[in-house]
Image (tube, rainbow, N blue to C red):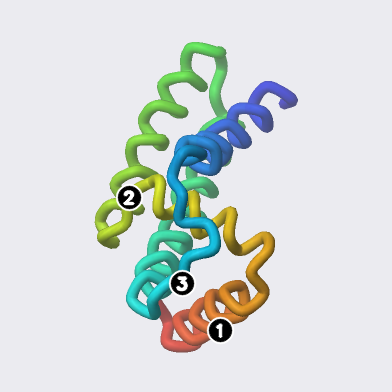
Amino acid sequence: MKLRTAAATVVTAMFLTAGAAFAQQGQAVTDDKVQSYVVAYMNVQDIVREYKSKADEAKSDAEIEKLRSFYGSHITEAVESEDLTVDEYNSITRQLETDTELRERVTEKIIEMRQDGQ
């Protein structure tokens, strides 16, 4: 169980650390980028939930590694399909930790999209 939980964490963490060199910190994030980020975020969360479910059923480290690779590529596709690079996605995620105005905008957009059934 510890291995599976750790593996699930790795899938998420690889996207939070992959863009460390991208320097969008402190820059204004446009409304279009907020929209793209929220759609990507919601899709990534769905993928991570599915990955965690599959990882819990995995019978070996090799199987978990295959799942990590498979779902990792799906996360990349989910982000890039919203006209964001993984670096931009990660940068916005990091910026949310310190930028309360951006965090409010993202939260409002998530609530709006959930109410609209997206």
Q: Amino acid at mark 1?
A: Glu
Residue placed at 45% from the left, 81% from the top?
A: 113
User: For residue 1, which numbered disc appears in the image?
Assistant: none
**In front of the other: label 3 or label 2?**
3
In the picture of the structure, the residue carrying the numbered disc 3 is: 28
Q: Quadrant of residue 57?
A: top right
Residue 91 place in picture, x, y as percent: 49, 53
Q: Amino acid at mark 2?
A: Thr
Sequence-wise first label, 1 or 2 = 2
Residue placed at 41% from the left, 35% from the top?
A: 72
In the picture of the structure, the residue carrying the numbered disc 2 is: 85
Q: Is residue 56 rendered to the left or right of residue 20?
A: right
In the picture of the structure, the residue carrying the numbered disc 1 is: 108
* Residue nearest the viewer, comparing 84 with 7: 84
Q: Quadrant of residue 8?
A: top right
Neighbourhood count class around disc 2 (C-alpha, 10 Å): few under 14, some 14–19, many 20 upward: some
Q: Is residue 4 rendered to the left or right of residue 116?
A: right
